[in-house]
Image (cartoon, rainbow, N blue to C red):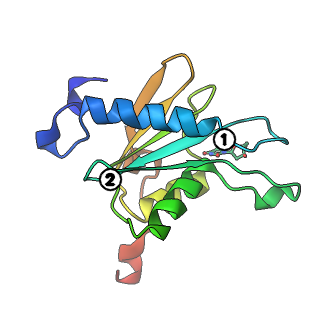
Amino acid sequence: MGDRFSKEADGLPSAAAIERLVAAAAEVREAAYTPYSHFAVGAALLTPGGAIYRGCNVENASYGLSLCAERNAIFHAVAEGVRQFSAVAVVTENAVTPCGACRQVLAEFNLEMIVIVADLAGGRRVYRLSELLPDAFGPAHLGN
Ligand code: THU
């Protein structure tokens, strides 16, 4: 991680928090249910208070019903009454960025959250969600 993401004073997650988040995403990835794609994804969301909410992808024999890891994590957190997120880590075998649908769902809660994508060998890239979803449609467009 660069220094840019290691200063709590900036309101950015600390380097230690990011390490915990990536580790949580890697761990929950092990629970992914992927008999069709064999592409396991783990996602972990960080709250401003340091709590972590996790999700894995869950596929279905009716393929279109499959749920991505990122949305599973968001829905889990929201069901627990949590709606504020500062970062999300996504772990896959090849450090892919979240799909378009998940970008939109993440953006509902914080378009400026940090997105860390990691692979299994320690490779990482870091984005702002707003970089991944430019000119986003969001709550403000509906007066929220
Ligand atoms: N998948 C995710 O969980 N997150 C993404 O951002 C990309 C795709 C899942 C959906 C499906 O279970 C598998 O990866 C292959 O598309």
Q: Is residue 136 visible?
A: no
Q: Residue furthest top?
A: 121
Q: Nearer the viewer, mark 2 or mark 1?
A: 1
Q: Position of residue 25 (x, y in %)?
A: 51, 38
44 is higher (above) or lower (below) than 39: below
Looking at the image, residue 118 lies above or below residue 135: above
The residue indicated by pointer 2 is 47
Horizontal side of residue 50 vs 45, given as left or right: left
From the image, tell me which residue sits under label 1.
31
Identify the image quadrant of residue 88.
top left
Figure quadrant of the C terminus = bottom left
Amino acid type, label 2: Thr
**Residue in view at x 31 percent, y 50 percent:** 86
Question: Mark 1 vs ligand 1: CB under 8 Å?
Answer: no
- Between marks 2 and 1, how big is the CA–CA gap? 22 Å
Q: Residue furthest bottom?
A: 143
Above or below: residue 21 compared with residue 85:
above
* Image quadrant, ligand 1: top right
User: Could you say which disc has been placed on residue 108 in the image?
Assistant: none
Mark 1 Cα shell of 10 Å, populated few (<14), some (14-19), many (≥20): some
Residue 9 position in % (x across, y down):
11, 41
Contact flag, marks 2 and 1 (Cβ < 8 Å): no
Mark 1 is on which residue type?
Ala
Residue at x 78% of width, y 35% of height:
38
Q: Position of residue 141 (x, y in %)?
A: 39, 77
Q: Count neighbours of disc 2 (C-alpha within 10 A) and say few if under 14, some if 14 to 19, many if 20 or more.
A: some
- Residue at the left extreme of this rendering: 9
With 64 as the anchor, is 108 left or right in this view? left
